[in-house]
Amino acid sequence: MQDIGEIPMVDDVTDIPQFISEATMTTAQSLTELGIRFFINLLVCWILVQFFYYKKSRRRDYYFTFMVFSTAMLMLLYIMGNVEVGVGLTLGLFAIFGVIRYRTETVPIREMTYLFVIIALAAMNGLAPVYKVVGSVTDNPHYEISVGTVLVMAISNALVVLLIWVLEAGKILKHTSTKLIQYDRIDLIVPEKRAELIADIEKRVGVKVNNLEVGHVDFLKDSAFIKIYYTLDKDQTGSIDTITRAKDFLEQ
C-alpha cells in the first residue's frame, strides 16, 4: 500500500481566500437618504407649526424655536445613527439639554407638548432605515431604497398630523381655559348667591363661565381672587391668561 501523505495544516486563517464582501453606501445614496429624511421632517414640522400651533398662539419666538430645533435634532440623530457614539458622549448630550431646560423660564404645557412631538418626529425620521441591502453575501450586495419603509415613515408622520388636527379642531375635546380675576363684590361669593355671582362675572368679563373657584379673600379691601373656567371659541387660545407680567405680554 502506498503511504498517504500528511494533510498540511493551515495555521493562519487569513490564508483562506475571502469571497464575502460587505455592502457599502455610495455618496449619492447617502445624500439621497439625508434629503429624504430632511424634507419629510421639515414638511411635517412646518405643517404642525404653521397650521396648528401658530394659527392659534401667534408666538413667533416658538415658531422659530420649533423649526430650528426639529432640524437640528434630525441632523444630530442622523449622525449618531451612522457612527459609533460612546456612552460618555450620549450622557453629555442629555446633560446639555438638561442645563438648557433648567436655565430657561417655564414653558407652557401646550408649547412643551408640541416640542415633545417635534422631538419624537425628528427621532423617527432620523433613525428609520431608508435603504436596505439587496443581494446575497457572495453576490455583490448593495443598497437600494426601501419603498416600504419610506411609506411606513410617511404614514406615521401623517397619523401624527391627523391626530393633532382632530384634537386642535375640537372634534373630541372642547378647548377650555382658565382666568384668574380679582373680584370686588365679596358679598356674592357666598354659596347661596353663586348663580348671581356667575351672572355678574359673565356680564363683566364677557365669557360663558363653566365653573369657578373662590380663593384668597381680603375683607379690608373688599376683594377676592376668583379662578373661572370657560370654553374657548374655535381657533382661539387662552395662552394670555397665564401671563402675569407686562414684560411677558410685550415679548410676544
Image (cartoon, rainbow, N blue to C red):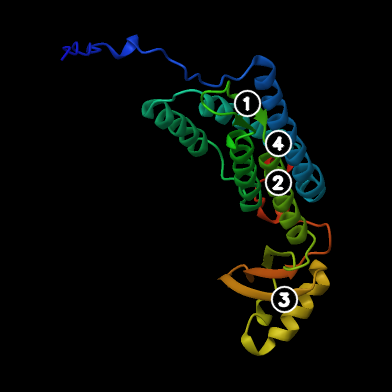
Q: Which residue is mark 4?
A: 41
- In the rendered image, residue 67, in percent from the top left (x then y), is placed at 71, 34
Point out which mark residue 210 bears: 3
For marks 2 and 1, give the CA distance.
24 Å
Q: How many marks?
A: 4
Label disc, if present, on residue 143 of the rendered structure: 1
Q: Amino acid at mark 3?
A: Asn
Q: Looking at the image, is mark 2 or mark 3 earlier in the sequence?
A: 2
Between 78 and 230, the residue placed more toward the observer is 78
Q: CA distance from mark 3 to mark 1?
A: 60 Å
Q: Secondary structure at mark 1?
A: strand
Residue in the picture at 72% in, 76% down: 210
Indicate the position of residue 22 as horizontal and vertical percent values: 51, 20
Task: Locate the N terminus by quadrant.
Answer: top left
Real-space Cα separation, disc 2 to disc 4, in angstroms: 8 Å
CA separation, marks 2 and 3?
Answer: 36 Å
Amino acid at circle 2: Asn
- Give yes or no for contact between labels 2 and 3 (Cβ–Cβ under 8 Å): no
Residue located farthest toward the bottom when viewing the structure as drawn:
192
Badge 2 element: helix
Tag 4 and tag 3, C-beta contact below 8 Å = no
Residue 241 position within the rendered picture, expressed as x and y whole percent measured from the top left: 70, 56
Q: Secondary structure at mark 3?
A: strand
Find residue 51 and report its horizontal and vertical position in percent. 82, 47
- Pointer 2 or 4: first along the chain: 4
Q: Label 4 sits on what residue type?
A: Asn
Image-quadrant location for residue 115:
top right
